Image: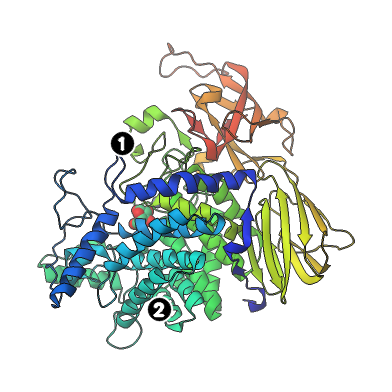
Amino acid sequence: MDKQAFTSPIDLKKVTVTDPFWHREMELVRREVIPYQWDALNDRVPGADPSWCMRNFRIAGRMMADQSRKGAQYVPPSYTFRGFNALPEDITKPEDDKFYGFVFQDTDFSKWIEAVGYSLTQHPDPELEKTADEAIDIVCAAQTPEGYLDTYYIINGMDAALTNLRDHHELYCLGHLIEGAVAYYQATGKDKLLRAACRFADYIADRFGPEEGKCKGYPGHEIAEMALVRLYEVTGEEKYLHLGKFFVDQRGQEPNYFIEEEKTRARREGRAVCHTNTNPAYHQAGKPVREQDEAVGHAVRAVYLYSGMADVARQTGDDSLYAACERLWDNIVRKKLYITGGIGGTHVGEAFSYAYDLPNDTAYSETCAAIGLAFFARRMLQIKPDSKYADVMEQALYNTVLAGMALDGKSFFYVNPLAVVPYAARHDERLRHVEPVRRKWFGCACCPPNLARIVSSIASYAYTEKEDTLYTHLYMGGSIRKDFAGKELTMEVDAKMPWHGHVYVTLHCSEPVNGTLAFRVPGWAPDTVITCGDKQPVYKDGYAYLTGKWHEGDMIRLHLPMAVHVLASNPAVRADVDKVAFTRGPVTFCAEQADNGDNLHLLRVDTRYIGDHGEGVGVEFDHDTFGHETVKLHVPAKRLIMDESAPLYSQWRAPKEETAKIVLVPYYAWANRGEGEMMVWLRRK
Ligand code: FUB
Ligand code: ZN
């Protein structure tokens, strides 16, 4: 690793995002998702199942208050497992002192407060900040005097705390709490939640670590690793980095912690060991992380782990850990990545499938997993600016991540397949996980709040910086301020991505500033032209570096050719043989029933009329269909004429086809016009 190349995320308070595309998304999160989620956390959404989240915090807070009033030693109830998603018999009549919801229900709050923090950096809102402060009071009141903070065990019985790391997400709750607390602190300067997160982290650091007598376990669902590095970066406390590194180093070591933990639990509960329940590889614990070279198991967990590994590698200068990150990155990108930037080929365990198994209709491609992939990419970029990471980050963000949310911000996808037939999704058990239209919310509400936090912090994916260089990874209209040796430079960006390839950058500074501005040359636009007076760009690893003295009013112009790309998959992908998919810029397109009628499988692209650079495909700029500017593609095609009276099988003859045009729309916008079929990969002639 070249430490000189390392970069950091930018301070969100120094950025504004004004371009029509991302500003619109951020406003949806601010106006729709954050208030809706607050109601959801408080069980105030008519017709929706309760979340129980804030209710659990209130119950735990009352227990803590009782205890301190009585001045007594807290005597928690004795723990008995009440099911992974405990619900009252009658959902309208919860029992007063019971915990309900998933074992990780607390994280709904943590993700909400994180999104609130990011949103406040862009749009100060005293009312929202007041609500957030009140929520923080409720959450902090639930913390035990020792610093533990997970309402599932506080309410159900602390005697079993930290005894089921494999399934029970306490360390995942810690990780999300840290992420939320740091974001809120950085936005507001208020540290009450940050102090609570530190106390919980201290509690864990006192009990886990390489020292004799400490627990050798690690999270069953990763995120604490990257969160602890972030906590270290904010507080400067090395113990948090050590704990994050310990979790990374310890994973997959022998004897396997999860197997041993299951044996201990079985002994204590007086039952037989359940071997089938423990598959360490599912938790990325089949081998020590430095020996791993294939992305396996639960997809969200995997990319959260890899993000933490990259952070630990950067902070500790660990080359072997970084080499593992690179291998895992390559494995995903070469063998396990959907063209929509999604990951997770199978719903069985919400997991990665084997190499090249990328089915379209049964895909899982969880929204959270694409978000996690963007986390991983941003961290790899922080270690080494190489546009190959930014290309995938952008692909995930513009496609699967955004598809996760409806264009009105009011409903969400958890699963993001690449081919949907609504009738099949409703009737075929193998497609039980597929929803043809977005849902308002989910009992397991991991994806919508995850979307809220990534969209509201999108600028931190657009830029990273080091002392003498500002990197632009994504082109986003707005402005960013950067300090170069005590002098401030403001970069004003006029961009209309993802539809238009002209980017105009104007610089402002009160005195001349020396520094480097690096601009990404996307993989989809290798012929990008950059002009900047007499400064000549130097190209390295997919970035154009412009170095020198900058003056008020200097301009940089970029032209990114927005050709239509007609892509084929590696023939090893069985699902996509003899098919093509269309991209333009970072956007992947799909056919929808609303434009093309049903039975999309009868259509095939007539590639005879399409040139190598997408010639023959019509590009229509459209403002009406989706309520904001988008592009539609018009593709020459044929449609198979179906004779429904024909027998199931008959003598093969040249098929009867009629000439057709396929209209393609951006994948992220699908399912916003009612229910209908959708298809990304289309048959080709
Ligand atoms: O387990 C917590 C979250 O719930 C995971 O990240 C998602 O895949 C969902 O299972
Ligand atoms: Zn999710």
Q: Position of residue 509 (x, y in %)?
A: 77, 65
Q: Name the residue: 54% across, 16% down.
A: 641
Total count of labels: 2
Residue 13 visible here: yes
Q: Nearer the viewer, residue 125 or 163?
A: 125
In-front residue for pair 644/416 = 416
Image region (quadrant) for ligand 1:
bottom left
What type is the residue that disc 2 sits on? Leu
The quadrant the C terminus occupies is top right
Look at the numbered disc 2 and say if its residue's Cβ is closer than 8 Å to ligand 1: no
Q: Position of residue 651 (x, y in %)?
A: 48, 17
Residue 243 is tagged as 2
Residue 235 rendering spot, x and y as whole percentages: 47, 78
The N terminus lies in quadrant:
bottom right
- What label does residue 205 carry, if any? none
- What number is the disc on residue 429? 1
Please report whichever mark, 1 or 2, sits nearer to the chain's N-terminal start: 2
Quadrant of res 248: bottom left
Q: Secondary structure at mark 1?
A: helix
Q: CA distance from mark 1 to mark 2?
A: 43 Å
